[in-house]
Amino acid sequence: MVKTEDIKVLLNQYLKVLFLSTMRQCYADLALQARQESLSYEQYLLELAEHECITRQNNRIERNLKASKIPRDKNIDTFDLKRVPAKVAHQVRSLLEGSFVDHNENILAFGNPGSGKTHLLCAIGQELIRKGRKVYFTPCSLLVQELLRAKKELDLSRFLKKLSRYDALIIDDIGYVQQDRSEMEVLFTLLADRYERGSVMITSNLPFSRWEQIFKDPMVTAAAIDRLVHHSVILELNIESYRMEVAKKNKRKKPDGPAKSSK
Ligand code: ADP
Ligand code: MG
């Protein structure tokens, strides 16, 4: 017969070797509870296994959220869906379910600066991660610089492979800064590489009609748009800047601000 104290020591050792750290932490408390509630051995084991699984899942989500580089405050709870056109709100509700990623579909968000494109795609990205996906957020300008560096170091294919591990790639502000030919070339290479192999989520202030500014050559522009649009959801956020709206509201609220005194 093994003594109670020895059981504790051995259990701790075995659970440690098996990397079952949550079970190790909570088996004693749960055992006490199980005795009180007269649970069967199976029910107790089930509770333990559940705790281990849930903790691992939460830790994985936490790691993936951190690795995604998505700003945490840009989530769906802080996003006012009532502000966007009804069609967009409807599209977003379905996108939040995340199945677009299964079909390697893309999301293209267009609209004026401040209309909420970045916030919205980040929010969708965070929900994807909570559903067990891997997402990576990057400003387009930074991504292009990284692609160029990888190309210069003859490391482009490895870098593309690294990016291909993400189910969705958020490329923020495509076309925001003028790009030269070598920059647009690597960007095109990336888009072609992900075509039908992984989702791309893009924000842009430029409508497609002005994408030649990004890709320079009309053929390349058409090819890039064609690949992106083929399986895609387009979100048209043609609304006033959120910052502007907030500023106006604040101005109106001020008791003796210029808005009131000018009445
Ligand atoms: P864009 O990418 O279109 O330029 P952002 O997503 O950066 O716009 O939004 C500008 C600011 O306004 C951000 O701080 C963002 O969090 C906020 N914002 C925009 N739309 C909304 C919204 N519908 N609900 C809450 N905050 C919003
Ligand atoms: Mg933005």
Image (cartoon, rainbow, N blue to C red):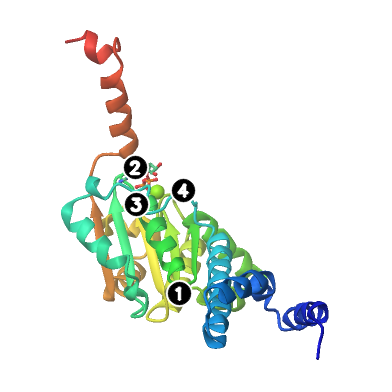
Is residue 162 shown to the viewer in this render? no
- Quote the CA–CA distance across marks 1 and 3: 20 Å
Q: Which of marks 4 and 1 is in front?
A: 4
Q: In which quarter of the image is the N terminus?
A: bottom right
Q: Which amino acid does label 1 sit on?
A: Asp
Query: Which residue position holds label 3?
Result: 117
- Quote the CA–CA distance across marks 2 and 3: 8 Å
Query: Which residue position holds label 4?
Result: 73
- Quote the CA–CA distance across marks 2 and 4: 16 Å
User: Sequence-wise, which precedes: disc 4 or disc 1?
Assistant: 4
Mark 4 within 8 Å of ligand 1, using the beta carbon: yes
Mark 2 within 8 Å of ligand 1, using the beta carbon: yes
Query: Which residue position holds label 1?
Result: 167
Horizontal side, residue 228 vs residue 11: left or right: left
User: Sequence-wise, which precedes: disc 2 or disc 4?
Assistant: 4
Give above or below for 246 relative to 191: above
Please, what secondary structure does the residue beneath circle 2 have? loop
Horizontal side, residue 95 vs residue 185: left or right: left
Horizontal side, residue 116 vs residue 185: left or right: left
Mark 3 within 8 Å of ligand 1, using the beta carbon: yes
Query: Which residue position holds label 2?
Result: 114
Image quadrant, ligand 1: top left
